[in-house]
Image (cartoon, rainbow, N blue to C red):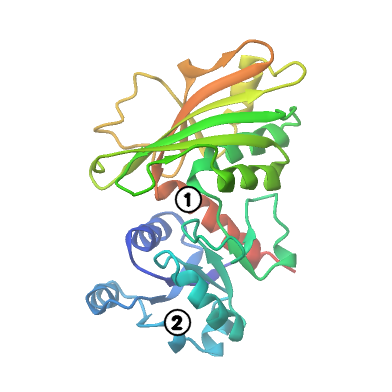
Amino acid sequence: MQSNILIAGYGVFGAGLVDHIESNHKNIKIVKIIEPNRHKRDILLKRGYKTCESPHELSSHDAHEAKVVIDCSPRGEGSKNKPIYSNIGLRAIFQNGEEDRSIGALYYPGSTNINKHEHFLMPLCSGISVLKVLSALKKNKMSLPYKILGTHSKVSNTSRMLMPNNPNANSQILELFGVNARMDIVYLRGEPYQNKFTYYGSVQLQYKEKAPSRKDFINSIAEHPWIDIISDKSDLLTNLSIKDKTAIVKESFYSDGKTISFMGLSSTPDVNYPIVIQAVLDIYSMR
């Protein structure tokens, strides 16, 4: 079944999403792209896409043709666009950069009831890898930890370099999987390599009783379609093969019977795309 969508914003996230859909999802048709920059609209027209300058130009016809808009607008713009979408009956998927956490229901595949909500918010990058691991454990009927300690880091230049015990990441993990977490976020000054940011994460899962064995744990998460188990010999500088998956380093796995720890890497914004696409497919699968 073909899924028709609108995309709002052709910046770093939106442009990458368009390329991702073109390369990987022939069953998804981008009906129109909303982009205020005229130069970018000209580029999109040459690529064969219909465009408009503002969400205000959307009509009920657009909402009928495409059930959902993926809003990739700059931070804060999504909140302004939300009432426009609602007024024409268009469902929306907002990105994790939106600071208004009430903009939509927090979404993660298998943990959110699509039928009960109109708009959705993607989870923060600082918790995505943990969510994938918990999802894999739950699917394989393995016990979940009672507590998670994690450090999330990337090269960036922002006024908020240090965010210990980030409440937003913690609350999202708790809401989706019922596990208490303490996620510390550290940004290091620097520039991306080949326009790609790489996130680094160090995670410890704590169990009150016996933790899964190292072997069972690795086998369980290796089945997840959005996780790759890689070697510490992998060349991640010249071979940017992580793409849209979370790469977990096999040699980093450690278990002492009550804790399991590991480290992982992911590229942004690519790591968000599979979850966004699954939200679209879930919306179109609604009865």
**Res. 61 image quadrant:** bottom right
136 w.r.t. 279: above or below: above
- Label 1 SS: helix
Q: Residue drawn 48% across and 70% down?
A: 78
The residue identified by callout 2 is 55
Q: Secondary structure at mark 2?
A: helix
- The picture places residue 185, in percent across and down from the top left corner, at 46, 38
Among numbered discs 2 and 1, the one appearing first in the sequence: 2
Q: How far across and down, in percent of the image, does residue 212 sit? A: 69, 19
State whether residue 251 is above or below residue 50: above
Q: Amino acid at mark 1?
A: Asn
Residue at 53 percent across and 82 percent down: it is 84
The image quadrant that residue 92 belongs to is: bottom right
Q: Which residue is mark 1?
A: 272
In the figure, 5 relative to 183: above or below?
below
Looking at the image, residue 85 sits to the left or right of residue 22; the answer is: right
Which quadrant is the C terminus positioned in? Answer: bottom right
What residue lies at 65% left-to-right and 39% top-to-bottom? 135
Please say whether residue 202 is visible from this viewpoint.
yes
Residue 237: x %, y % from top left: 26, 31
Q: Is residue 54 left or right of residue 70?
A: left
